[in-house]
Amino acid sequence: MTKKSITDPNELRAYERGFVPVLHKPVSMILVYPNSYSVAMSNLGYQSMFYQANLHPAVFCDRGWHHPGSPVKGILSGRHMRSFDIIAFSVSYELDYFHVAGCIRESGLGLYADSRPDTDPFLLLGGIAPTINPMPLSSCFDAIAAGDGEQLIAQFLDAYTGCRSRSGSDVIDAIETVEGVFCPSRHTAGRRIKRRIVNDLDAYPTQSVVLTPHCEFPDRFLIELERGCGRKCRFCAADYIYPRPRFRSAESILDHIDRTRAMTSKVGLVGVAVMHHPCIEEIFEQIIRWNMDCSVSSLRVESLTPRTAGLLKQAGQRTITLAPETGNDNLRKYINKQFTNEMLLAKIDLCVKVDITDIRLYFMIGIPGETDDDIRAICDLTAQCAAMGVNLRLTINPFIPKPHTPMQACAMDSRFELKRKIKMLRDRLNAMRNVTVSYPAVNQAYMEAALARADRHTGDAMLLSGSSMPNPKRIEAVALDVADMPWSVVDIS
Ligand code: SF4
């Protein structure tokens, strides 16, 4: 049996090390990640919310995850999901909405909030996907949290535990005043919910509180160095939701890493602009002195310098991940990525010089205005990179118009067009040595796009109706009247 194939909660629990909350408190909550245990435990938002909820003096929070065909159970208590007072879902990807609906269905609870009696658990939804657009599952949840959850969860739990009766309408009376909380049953046209932002990251440890070998980063202590990017790539919803980078202090980062050294020698630095941390060199130097194995999540191309590449190598980084998105400099400029193919090749050369030869590249197809020459340019750029003696792993994603971005109203390429472009890529890339490619599933991408821009009605039809999933035929351009867009309920100003 491979490590990742274990699904029995008791067995998985036996491998866990780290934070164990007090189990017996007046209010019980379960935090559910709508994907596998391995994906859940690799998600810092999920780990952080689990920790923050348990800091509340009156609340015990358990952890659960989606396991097809069986009801969600808490890993710590063994209790079924529906026996908790509060069920909270943390969702990062739109396609996991199907699993959310599956978890609720399999628990025996009614899918529609207005069909559930007051005695049923209170259902809360949070995470980056519903922050971008809370409407697709709005019929299903009593409340939806928009934005950073650390402060919000404490205020939500204060309001919940302060309710004299825990009946649905009393709780909603209490929590709808919490900034960032959207209560679909009380929503009135034109009312907007301000998404929450945590400015002082040092106040909240966003890091692995439970280590396990059964996740995507086995036994690695992950810590968030920064949040937000500020680069403003025109397709990137995360950057428009969180418009400027916020950094955790070097003192706080190193202090938390130091405290975990007795448990693990592996650390992962998380964030979209990790190398832009003002003290990144100091952080690396200390991690190297501690002789820890360190990895970072993806890098922005411009952040690689001879010095940072050398530090990455010394710290144990084996793979560098970069996202050129396209092989055409002009098209890259159009999406607001400010580097050229020449610069990318120079950065890969830096990696080779420090003996990091595993390179992962992300490309996007179907960018509005893209031509067949642009597809050929991806192949040409890949061939140039491969000729530098590196092992390349390419991930190809289709362009998906995401809410709140300058490209939110754009159409997607038709399915036929995307499949044709994938075939063009396959015909050339598959013949290249030392290049492996992961191609997108076009149907799934279409589903993701439809859910990203869905209103309540479309969300109900796709997620809750129980009929076979309508598969959108086309993702068209939409008229750009921002105030009418379903996600305009979230105020990101
Ligand atoms: S660099 Fe990455 S995280 Fe930053 S805006 Fe661009 S795509 Fe988004």
Image (tube, helix red, strand yellow):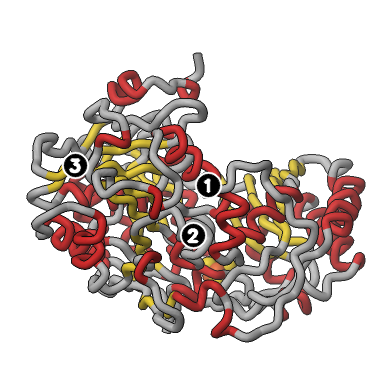
**Which residue position is annotated with label 3?**
28
Q: Nearer the viewer, residue 17 or 139?
A: 139
What amino acid is at disc 2? Ala
Q: Which residue is mark 1?
A: 96
**Residue in the image at 9% along x and 35% along y:** 24
Task: Of the two numbered discs 2 and 3 on the same chain, state the one appearing first in sequence.
Answer: 3
The percent coordinates of residue 328 (x first, y second) are: 80, 71
Instruction: Identify the element where label 1 is drawn.
Output: helix
Q: Is residue 22 above or below residue 326?
A: above
Quarter occupied by residue 485: bottom right
Q: Which residue corresponds to mark 2?
A: 129
Q: CA distance from mark 3 to mark 1?
A: 24 Å
Inspect the image, locate mark 1, and give the three-letter code of the amino acid beneath it.
Asp
Q: Is residue 483 above or below residue 116?
A: below
Residues at circles 2 and 1 in contact by the CB criterion of under 8 Å: yes
Q: How far apart in space, not on screen, are marks 2 and 3 (Cα)?
A: 25 Å
Q: Residues within 10 Å of mark 3 (few under 14, many from 20)?
A: some
Tell me if I can see residue 134 in this picture.
yes
Ligand 1 is found in the corner quadrant, namely bottom right
